[in-house]
Image (cartoon, coloured by chain):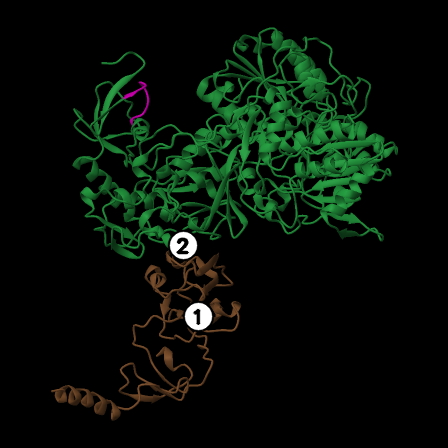
Amino acid sequence: MSDNDSVTLTINGREVAAEPGRLLIDVAEELGVFVPRFCYHPGMKPVAVCRMCLVQIEGQRKLQPACSTPVADGMVVNTQEAGAVDAQEGMLEFLLINHPLDCPICDRGGECPLQDQTYKHGPGSSRYVEPKRTYEKALEISDLVVLDRERCVLCWRCVRFSDEIAGDAFIQLVDRGPGTQILTFNDEPFDSYFSGNTIQICPVGALTSKPYRFVARPWDLKSAPSVCSYCSVGCPITNESRDEKLVRCQALPNENVNDFWICDKGRFGYHYVDSDERLTAPLERGANDEFQDVSWDHALERVAAKLRDGARVGVIAGGHLTTEDAWAIGKLAKNVIGTRDVDSRVADAGAPYADVMISGLSPAAGSSATINDLATARTIVWMGPDPKEALPVLYLKLRGAVLDHNAKLIVVSPRRLSLDGFATHVVRSEAGGEARAVDELMSSPAADDIGDPMVICWGPSSPGRDDAGVVAALGRLGAARDAKVLMCPPHSGSQGLLDMGVHPSLDAGHETAAEPGRDTRAILQAAADGRLDVLLLFGADVIADFPDADLAGRALGGGAHVVTVELFPTETATRSDVLLPSAAFAEREGTFTNLERRIQKLEPLLEAPGVAREPWRICVALARLLGDDWGWHSFVDVWNDIRSNVRTHTEVDIDALSARGPTPAPQYESGYEKDPSHSGGVVAGPGGQYPKGYRSGTPFQTGQNWPLSWELRGFEARQRPGIVAGTPNGARPSPSGSTTSTGSAAPDGESADGFVLYAGRMIYDEGTMISKSTALRHIARRPFVELNEEDAKELELSEGDEAVVRANGTEARLEVRLADIARGAVFIPYDQKGFRANTLTSAPRVTLARDL
Amino acid sequence: MALPEILTGMRVVIRNVFKGKETMSYPEVRRQPWPRFKGRHVLERHPDGLEKCIGCELCAGACPADAIYVVGAENKPGARFSPGERYAQIYQINYLRCIFCGLCVEACPTEALLMTTEYEISGTSRDDLVYTKEQLIVDAPIQRHWDTKIEYSPDRTTKQKAGRDGASS
């Protein structure tokens, strides 16, 4: 017998204790008994439609699907007795009736759950001789996904994912009976930001990736675990390469971060790594204003010469640097060069991250909540950018928290966000009045749904908005009930840069600096005024990303010696004096710190092009030339230094970052070997039938070199959970209502003219990295301006018109879209086709007029 | 007595004196290998002229010497190379690595890859010995370094005049 929180059952003669309510298929898998399956996926609710996982349970008249049967006390289960084995063989024979045998050209071939499970559990031959059902092959159902309905085994995984997880039910089972097929509605494209996940979970080759189509076979691929380099959610991925080219990124599961999912930007946005435009050697501006290739020694010596002798230096770091780079940059700037003018906020310039600590929301300038706290929260307050566009996988987590875990979601925003569809309360704030809306939350109808535990999600919404006021208001809201905060900076490296003190008023470990330095805006202003000698830009494309393109342009022309560490010759880089090539995320060992301050490791897969180096190595070399030898030669050296100097990171065990957890399923690690009891010791391979052991060592026989499908590998990398960085204890800054003003534009006065400008990121844009993606760069939309209907009426604008948007003497012609947005506010997306919003975002207000 | 042994030995000697020479003046005269000799590969075509190879890389996967390199691509309406969706954009066999085991031919699902009896594979540079698809496709002439005037059948009973592509028949 067993106690309340555990039941005891017997699976294939082995007794096992399990939590009540768990599914039989999971419990068996942990025991090492693999029950074949197609429709079951641990990230989704079971439906038991494929009938592949039928098992025998003593006392039950019929076979039961293990994927939807909860374990019960005293249950005696058998997965290998004649009845269950017959069912498995029968199901596979049925599935293969209509499945075309075009495995040789199928992108799934070689890592296909249907192939693998047929070898392992299938009948060996088919009795079916009639013609197969046929459909038109290779239907392109979106710019990214190709559908082959013939291969589909109707497991519903894609349908369930789209509906349950993503909420974009663009793909559905249509028709009935033998004609049942997967299709989109009315030939509308499968335009989901998460469509790539259906490719990965498809247990056959029915949904395949268009960018990866026929690029490689699974056994060609080298792969290394890594972390997505785009947004700050930091989804773990595998990078896979063929012939030293990155050809595929797939999601790795981490139940703390992304469950099993990544967005299409992370999945298909990798092409920039292999772009021909990458910088491969240090460049120096020579005599005729032309760049010349120079050696590292020469380039670094030139930079060091400029940095010596009390030069006035400003350092700006971009958001895609790793934690190690961040530590090296902070150390170089503060300890070696001796400047406090260092900042890592470019697109999010002026975002009051430090205020999150000062207002008492969190003990660090970062999250105090984890992403999974969303699922256990009673109330979630969202006060940030549109998560579906900016932090897509966090959107999935928020959606799951509300729909599956009954959290109450309160969205405060002046414009409609993707969350509004399932939010419990939507508070539409006035233009520029978000802080007031937060203050009034407790007296609004939403107050009834505010309870503990509460998670406040905040991210900088738009340059020039009163984020400091918002954070202060959230601080007041949170202080009343000890809420946790999930702070959402924009980029993969943003939080790591804050943790490492690449910030004018913070030191590493979230210590407040005695004398704050200049922030990005002030550094650029100083450079523009000729008050800086050297401007060091680490992956910071200030002309494209800084909210005031004009100021950035003047800063580069202000006479300072500009040194840029970059992947690409961006506009900023081509205007600098020395250009140093950097290694990209797939080419290096490193860590990203995500928005919940989880540190996850990148493993190197490729060689950096030419002589490109990691930015931290550049810092090491510069420091040495400036007379300070740090003695770092490897990733481990950097971390030893971080651990002994950063109070929040002393406990980080970097070996644990790459450690693999327990791998389940010893039984099926060996791949193809069929159970000898009913296979006669013969293994079928594509070359025919060979006795077992013959030709051992070639992939067909042993499964050693052969990439098994994820199902059979038991979702191997549930393994790398990452480590959440510590929070500073002890001297916690006292909560105070006052906030520091960090360069944000003045709050809007009542008398100001024009519209309050909100600018935000859309998932696909013309950013430096994503615009190199052959898959995604065509998807970026035309630029538009979102406007309230009433406002539009007054201006005599209607949907689709072209409006002239003016700010600070610049103007742009943008297509008008009527939207649910507060009166007096307009929304403009960043970096859409042919238009950079940061030419307009320098002013807090813009005027609109009809294009005449 | 040793006489019987001597006579036995002399019988062998005398028989071989009249037997004719086993050596031949290669490359002017040469012998065809047996039909199942495993020589260099060809990529077959269908009767309608489309390539049989679909670029599936199973040959490359089966190759124990890692001698085969294939990159697939998609047939487009204007540029069709093979039936179906996929064809081999790049197909290379590195004859410096190939051990002529024939596993690639066995693995080929479309019988596109066959082995000829051609054994003259030599070159003066490494690059020469990486055969491309253009060299391997069946209608590409098999390059011989020297002219052969006479060719014998494998059992050396029939003599025939050899053309330049005599070996592939």
Name the spot of residue B131 as percent of width and height, x first. Answer: 47, 68
Label 2 environment density (alpha carbons within 10 Å; few <14, some 14–19, many ≥20): many
- A173, above or below A97, in the image: above
Chain A hue? green
- A425, above or below A300, in the image: above
Tag in front: 2 or 1: 1
Find residue A833 and report its image quarter: top right
Boundaries of the magenta span: A17-24
Chain B hue? brown
Residue A22 lies in the magenta-colored region: yes
Viewed as shown, does residue A540 lie left or right of A175? right
Q: Residue at x 74, y 44 (%)?
A: A579
Disc 2 residue type? Ile
Residue B47 lies in the magenta-colored region: no
Q: How many marks?
A: 2
* Residue labelled with disc 2: A105
Do the residues at discs 2 and 1 belong to one chain?
Answer: no
* Residue labelled with disc 1: B137
Find residue A30 and report its image quarter: top left
A486 or A653, nearer to the observer: A653
Q: Which quadrant of the rendered structure holds the N terminus of chain B?
A: bottom left
Residues at marks 2 and 1, CA–CA distance in whole angstroms: 20 Å
